[in-house]
Image (cartoon, grey):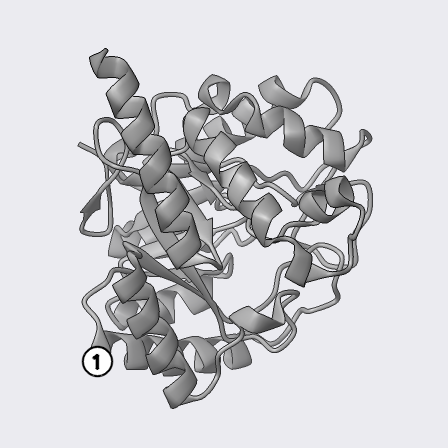
Amino acid sequence: MNRLGSVSVGGSNPVRIMGILNTSPESFYKKSIKTTKQQITQTVKKMEKDGADFIDVGGMSTAPYLSTLISEKLEIRRLKHTVNIIQNISNLPVSVDTCRANVASELLKHGVDIINDISGLKYDKKMINVISNYNPSLVLCAFSKNIVVGDTLPKTKKLLKESMTLAKSAGISSKKIVLDPAIGFFRKKGRGPFFTKINSEWFQRDLTVLCNLKKIKQGQPILVSVSNKSFIGKILHHSQNLADRLAGSLATEVLSVINGADIIRTHNVKETKQVVSIVQKLSSSNKSL
């Protein structure tokens, strides 16, 4: 049985919900930014009430179209502050969204269950040693430091397989690994270091992946994070207005679940939980006919 932290995932388990909590003022979705003890406490309690299975905490924005690189010291300070608050008010597993080894190490010392590495262990060479020492659960995103050329699905599958190989070399069981196809992180150009450069249209790449999730799973649970992403704004023709992306986010999450997603990472826990529950109920009823 696969587990992410203390929660079983994939297979016959229900689709799990991962709530996003950002502590970085630079993040693209301003409503997700919580920095004070009161804000963090209220948000976490609401996420738990609304049905979240995990809380994913970010201390630095990694949006490829933003220049948001900060010091490791600042990222650690933000994350420690937030994680300490969460651990005092909730038993939900905490995932830390970082691809930097020193940051991961400091947070794992504080009892974090999961490392969500958007580089799939490829950005920081020291990350292998950290995960070998602490043996956490992992979310591994498709990522390459080199330009990716060629067919979308085989290339995405190959990048994810490379990250799984790295994790296994550090002694991490495949039962503790979840894959993420990195929606929104494949671009022709970007302003930060945390994206994969491609020579094709990023918008089409994301759509192709979302329609073919089962082809890249490789026997692992798969996490999809599409909440308020750029491609939704592009489809709806209001690319800068994030307030108009809720319906598009939910529709895409429904499609993702139908196509094989096991975990949905979202800013909108209550609404996502509702639509996912409906999809699973309908799917279950259909199988029983």
What is the quadrant of residue 90 in the picture?
A: bottom left
Residue at the (48%, 83%) spot, across then down? 35
In the rendered view, tell whether residue 67 sits above or below residue 164: below
The residue tagged 1 is 88
The quarter in which the C terminus is drawn is: top left
Q: How many marks?
A: 1
Residue 163 location (% of width, % of height): 47, 36
Residue 283 location (% of width, % of height): 32, 23
In the rendered view, tell whether residue 1 sits above or below residue 212: below
Near mark 1 (Cα within 10 A), the count class, few <14, some 14-19 or many ≥20, is few
Residue at the (78%, 59%) spot, across then down? 240
Left or right: residue 234 compared with residue 137: right
| 103 or 202, nearer to the observer | 202
Residue 119 in view, yes or no: no
Left or right: residue 17 compared with residue 62: left
Left or right: residue 171 compared with residue 178: left
| 165 or 12, nearer to the observer | 12
Which SS class for mark 1?
helix
**Hey, what amino acid is under mark 1?**
Asn
Q: Residue farthest to the top?
A: 289
| 234 or 23, nearer to the observer | 234
What is the quadrant of residue 51 in the picture?
A: bottom left
Residue 272 in view, yes or no: yes
In the rendered view, tell whether residue 221 sits above or below residue 96: above
In the rendered view, tell whether residue 225 sits above or below residue 76: above
Residue at the (53%, 69%) spot, across then down? 32
The quarter in which the N terminus is drawn is: top left
Residue 208 location (% of width, % of height): 64, 24
Residue 248 location (% of width, % of height): 61, 45
